[in-house]
Amino acid sequence: MDILIHKLTCSSCGNIFQEPKILPCLHTFCKSCIRAFMVETCTLCPICNKKIGITKVGELCDNVFLYSAFDMLALMKDRQCFDCDICEPGDSSSVAFFRCPTCMQYLCELHGSAHLKARATKSHQLLTLDQLITNWKLAYLNRPTYCSQHTKEQLTSFCEQCDYPVCNTCIVNEHKGHSHMSIYHASSLFKQATNQLIGQTKPRIIELRDTISGIEKMCKDISANANTAIDDIEECFNKQVETLMERRKQLVREVQNCKMERLEALHEQRDRLQMRLLSVSEMYNFVDDAIQNGNAADYLDIKNAIDEQLQLVINHQDELEIVEEDYIAFHPNDVATQVAIKFLGYIDTRYAYPPLCTAEGPVCDRDNTRVQIFDLASYEHVSSLDMTTYIRDGPFDIIIDSKGRLLVTDPNGNGIFVFDDDGNLLYKIGSMGQDVGQFGGMCYIAIDDRNNIYICDSENSRIQVFDERGTVTNCFGSYGKQHGQFNLPSGISVASNDKIFVADRGNHRVQIFQLDGQFLHTFGTRGSLHGEFDFPHGIATDIQNNVIVADHYNTRLQIFNSDGEFQHKIDNIILPHCVAIDKSGHIYVTTKDNRIYVY
């Protein structure tokens, strides 16, 4: 019974169907439920989200296939709920005992016996109601279907020309002359074709179930792997904490040992000097007493001994220099540690769903006149694109837009070359020159989230902006030292807060602009202290809008917040040239020794 109740329950209201209607997508709901959600969801099926395509509930067909299930449920609740279809209404003996599936009639015991004796029906199989419930075959409970035109006539034939069932009266009137066949024969023929479609559909159901099972398993695996990763993170950081605590103990021990050694040395020096002071003081008192209170003869008798001892005191090199210093201080030297902690560990998801993301990074291999593609998870080489045909002296700078296209600059200013992800040239932007839309030589490139292209036109000391098809939309900057002017700018980045950051190499500073080129702020001057530069040569911004600057001749990276306030630095990088950062926060730096360093 539970199976029947589930079959007859509306998924919208959760109750037994009331006037069940079939939607075009073959999902069934109560008539009242359909009327409600047709208003609320703009005629979308709540299950498959497909458009219903009608405006009136009355246009929908009843789900007659549920009638047998309703009758079975009624029988299971009360075996005497149906009367004989032949007996007169109200006859006390008309309670149904048999069911004839062929005639689709309920029969009492009397009419059931007659049914088996009549010539036309004696071959029919009669089932008792108990047998119906035991066999649980809903097809035995099918109700007769009547013609919509001749409401007392059952549908007995199928009009092949009109492609729908008809009654005998229809055949001799409205469908006269049309070819037709028995409704059972037509049903058998069409069921064969439908069964073929069902056969083709069944594997899809299996595939969907398998995929759902795979998703459920993957959800469990993701949770398990996430918990394992969290445990590993806890273990890693606990070890780091232990290491830090051990280092703290070591440093404290060093301070304590230094203190004890110095105090011991000072105490020894103090004890020696106190003994010396006592000796000299007693001699001084003796001599002073001899001079003040002794008679002349006695003084003269020991005069030489006194002079000798006093001379020894005068000539003695006492330890008047304190043997130790009081300076003890702790220098954290923690900038590198803080940077290391910031990038300590990374989350390796390994697999990236191709339609959603990419895990590859392109690198300009200028001397070999090619672009190399690397897997950012394993740093393994994936492929190479030969640039010889397009860029004779090798690619200079490169970026990937949100559509997966490669934008590559020419070191001689011959233009920006745009390739698809297979390396096929789509089009070229600009040419060599000084006019707007032309380039003076080395160009650095950036894009925003709308695929607008920002070119740091170094030798023309300006920034040019193009839309994704290469039409110039803005150009700002000129040669000079004033705000908004440049001296060989050598790096550009567009942050997610819609600010443009430019590494103004010759002026040893970074300038910040709005997207329209309006000057906002500048930071940095020439020098080697924090926040100072010596020919900044590349720039990038991360997802928090921190600014990473390749401080070329200071052989370091400097990291600033979006307002230009110094945060950290990474030292000992051999002439860093270009810098980039991925979404995981890893910093990639190209250097003079033809290497890429990852931090």
Image (spheres, rainbow, N blue to C red):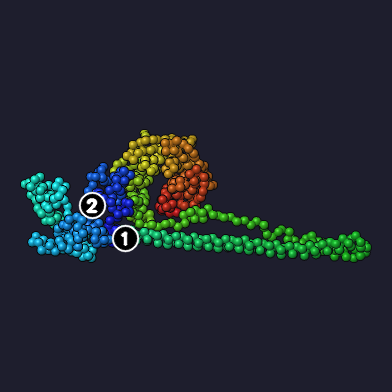
The residue that mark 1 highlights is 213
Q: Nearer the viewer, residue 594 or 448?
A: 448
- Which SS class for mark 1? helix
Proximity of marks 1 and 2: CB atoms separated by less than 8 Å: no
Q: Which amino acid type corresponds to the residue marked 2 in the rendered image? A: Asn
Can you name the residue that lies furthest to the top here? Answer: 435
Residue 475: image quadrant is: top left
On screen, residue 380 versus residue 85, left or right, reads right
Mark closest to the chain's N terminus, 1 or 2 = 2
Label 1 and label 2: CA atoms lie apart by 31 Å
- Mark 2, other Cα within 10 Å: few <14 / some 14–19 / many ≥20: some
Residue at 33% in and 44% down: 40
Q: Which amino acid type corresponds to the residue marked 1 in the rendered image? A: Ser
- Which SS class for mark 2? loop
On screen, residue 186 versus residue 532, left or right, reads left
- The percent position of residue 209, horizontal first and vertical second, equals 28, 59
On screen, residue 454 versus residue 556, left or right, reads left
